[in-house]
Amino acid sequence: MQFFGGSEISPSPPAPTASGNNGHMMYVFNRNGVCLLYREWNRPLRTLDAQQDHKLMFGLLFSLKSLTAKMDPTSAVEKGNLGMPQLPGQGCSFHSFRTNTYKLSFMESPSGIKIILVTHPRTGDLRESLKYIYNLYVEYVVKNPLYTPGSPIRCELFNTTLDQYVRGIA
Amino acid sequence: MAAIYTLYIIRKSGGLIYYYGSAGRMDTNDSLRVASLWHSMHANAISQQLSPVSGCLGIELLQADTFDLHCFQSLTGAKFFVVCESGAQHMENLLKFVYELYTDYVLKNPFYHMEMPIHCELFDINLTQAVEKDRVAFWADEIHIQLLSHFYSD
C-alpha cells in the first residue's frame, strides 16, 4: 500500500496511455460502501438498476480483495480465514482486472476511499491516473467547505474536470 | 524467472478438481473455498453483469500487488487458472497447453469420471514437466542473452 505525498495536484498529469474515448464509467465508494459518485460516459449495456449495480460492484471488490489477500503467495504469515475483514492497506490487494470487454482499475486510499475506473480492455496501466483522480477528489471535493463527508458528491467543477481528464487518458 | 506459484482447475459447477503447487501454503479447505469464490466472481454472476458492453466472458487477468492470476475458460465450462509472478509472460499459452494435456490425459482416460477430482499420474507428470519446461525455456533465453552480450563485448 502506497501512501500519497503532499495534497497538491502534481504539476503534470500522467501521460495518456492511449488516445480516444474509451472510458466507460467510474465509481467512487467510501469505506462504508456508500457510492459517493457514479459517472457514466459510454455504457450501452445495463443489466441492473443503479442501486443494485453499485452494490454488486462494491461486493465484487470486497470479494476480490479477500481472494487476493488469501491467495498472496509471497507472504508466509498466517493470513486468517477467507473473507476476514481487513483495514485499507492491510493484506495483498489488487490494482486491475481485465475481461474481454472491459478493464477495471481499482485504487484504495488509506482512508478507505475506493476509486474504480472501467475502460476499454486494451488501456495500459492506470495506477498513476487513479492517483491523479484521487488528487482531484481531494482538491475539488474534500476541500470544498459545502461538502459533508460521506454524502454523494455534487460538485460541478469536480465533474467537469474529471470528464475532461478521463477523456484525455482513456 | 517466471515463477508459477499455483495452478487450479475447476469444473463448470465451481468445484476444485485439480490443484498444483506448493502444498504447504494453503490447506485443502482454503483452496476449495478460493476456487469456488473465483468461480462465482468469474462466471455468469458478477463480472459479466457489470460489463458496460455485451459479450463479456469473464475475467482473463487479475493483477494483484504481488501476483498475477491468468484464467482460461474452455468451451465446456472448465476453468483453468494460474497464479504467477507479476508480469509473467505467455501464461495464456501455458493454460492452453494445460488444457490440451487435460483433454489428452484426463478426458481420454477410461477410468476418469467426469467432473470428479483428477488423479491421473501421467497428467501429473506432464503438467509438472510443462511448468518446469517453461522455467527452463526462460533460463535458456537468459543464458543465450548473456552469451550473446559476452560475444559482442569481446
Image (tube, rainbow, N blue to C red):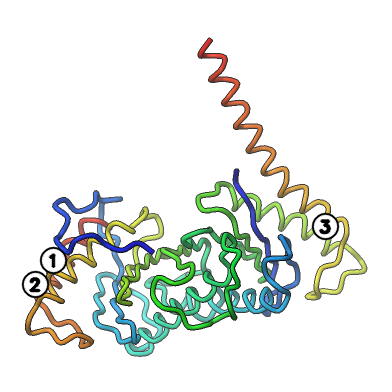
Q: Residue furthest right?
A: B111
- Depth check: give the residue in front, B29 or A100: B29
Mark 2 falls within which chain?
A
Q: Is residue B50 left or right of residue A22?
A: right
Task: State the mark number for residue A85.
Answer: none
* Residue underneath mark 2: A157
Name the spot of residue A155 as percent of width and height, x first.
11, 78
Q: Is residue B143 left or right of residue A97?
A: right
- Determine whether label 2 and label 1 are within 8 Å by CB: yes
Indicate the quadrant containing the N terminus of chain A: top left, top right, bottom left or bottom right. bottom left
Mark 3 falls within which chain?
B
Q: Please state which amino acid type lies under the numbered disc 3.
A: Phe
Measured Cα–Cα span from mark 1 to mark 3: 55 Å
Residue under disc 3 on the same chain as residue under disc 2: no
Mark 1 falls within which chain?
A
Q: Residue at x 72, y 65 (%)?
A: B24
